[in-house]
Image (cartoon, rainbow, N blue to C red):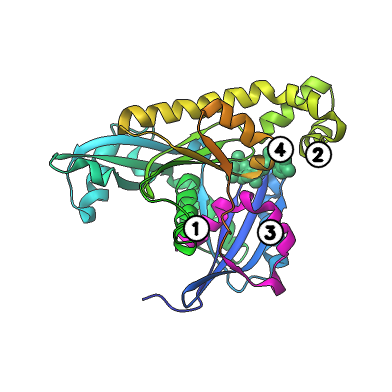
Amino acid sequence: MLKQRKSIVGLDIGTSCIKAVELTREKYDHVITGYAQIEVHHESSRQDAIAELMAAAKFRTKRVATAVSGKNVVFRYITMPHIKDDKLLQAVRFEAGKYIPFDVDDVELGAQKLDAAGDEGSNEMKVLLVAAKKAVVQDQSRMLTDIGLQPISVGVDGFALGNAWELGDMVNPGLQEPGRTVALVDIGSTKASINILRDNISCFAREVPIGGQDLTNAIARRLGIEQQQAEELKRDPGDQGEIMQEAIGQTLEDLGNEVNLSFDFFENQFDGEVQEVWLTGGTSLLPLLEESFEKSFEKRTKTWSPIEGLKVKADNVDVEALNQLSPQLAVAVGLAAAI
Ligand SMILES: Nc1ncnc2c1ncn2[C@@H]1O[C@H](COP(=O)(O)OP(=O)(O)OP(=O)(O)O)[C@@H](O)[C@H]1O
Ligand SMILES: [Mg+2]
């Protein structure tokens, strides 16, 4: 049974920025009782950065929910005979070897039935299979326990996004119209995570290996400047807006095209249309991103805040930073919400 006032920290260990959001359930409310984020510049400093961040945030709990992502995680869509939920994982484990590029014994597997509404009468079902290298999951858990944390779950970014969205739906009833198909797209530093939800059920997840770092690289190349300077200019172009737009134009177009390919795949496979696109991730803070993607997707495209409607314990949270950077926190919020 759920205990009241249970706290959990969603810890999103991003490539360039670590984000931590503590959610506490108080009766019927979800309250943000802590928040911190810190940029990391080298893989080697990640563990120290997490320890520093956790100490600074003064969280109530050491229980953390994290995720793995990148090339050690694969998503596959498989069609298989109908199987009861409690036998699903066992059956998928049996089939997985045919579909994933790793040895089944070396991976943690997750499975989710898709398209529950559409398959009545059919004796086949579509299943989304997620496989993450065991060694990666174990290394990450060890890294966290070494600094005194209690890792309690390991998810993937795309599904965390879906959980954050569902939480938003729960705390803001009536805001989202039922029956819609939406694409959540989180654009980080090295990748964009996509999750397409139909009526709040995840139907499609994928990662595209393009992100904010590629934009910074394009600016540095175009202007012949150092990375650090290009990064600053990207965030605050001042009077260089035009040249900056020009510098990042091609990369944004490439990213938009890749995301569009995922929409096409979904639309072909699942016989539905993505109606709206909702952006998060640090790169969604880029001015004009909504506008540029709206043109490329030809769909309503907006940035969203995963903390909308949540209460905040203001005496332990920098509320201004939280509000300003909230789109960057979607994965962290979703990880905490899933528990
Ligand atoms: N105000 C801003 N304007 C534009 N880009 C920004 C802004 N603030 C942060 N970014 C970019 O957002 C990215 C970091 O976002 P985020 O924290 O979502 O990524 P991450 O989780 O570390 O990366 P990944 O998900 O790829 O592992 C960086 O590329 C950074 O340059
Ligand atoms: Mg990220």
Circle nearer the N terminus (4, 1) = 1
Secondary structure category for the residue under label 1: helix
Q: Is residue 41 visible?
A: no
Q: Is 262 in the magenta?
A: no
Which residue is at the front of the view, 241 or 61? 241
144 lies left or right of 48? left
Residue located 31% across and 30% down the image: 269
Q: Position of residue 314 (x, y in %)?
A: 69, 71
Q: Is mark 4 within 8 Å of ligand 1?
A: yes
* Gap in angstroms between the C-alphas marked 4 and 2: 9 Å
Secondary structure mostly seen in magenta is: helix
* Gap in angstroms between the C-alphas marked 3 and 4: 18 Å
Circle nearer the N terminus (2, 3) = 2
Labelled disc at residue 322: 3
Residue that badge 4 annotates: 287
Q: Is residue 119 visible?
A: yes
Q: Is 337 in the magenta?
A: yes
Tag in front: 4 or 2: 4
59 lies left or right of 209? right
Number of callouts: 4
Q: Which residues are magenta?
A: 310-339
Residue that badge 2 annotates: 236
Labels 3 & 4 near each other (Cβ < 8 A): no
- Assess disc 4: are there few (<14), some (14-19) or many (≥20) residues with their C-alpha within 10 Å of its C-alpha: some
Residue located 82% across and 34% down the image: 237
- Residue type at mark 1: give it: Gly
Circle nearer the N terminus (4, 2) = 2
Where residue 60 sits, quadrant-wise, is bottom right
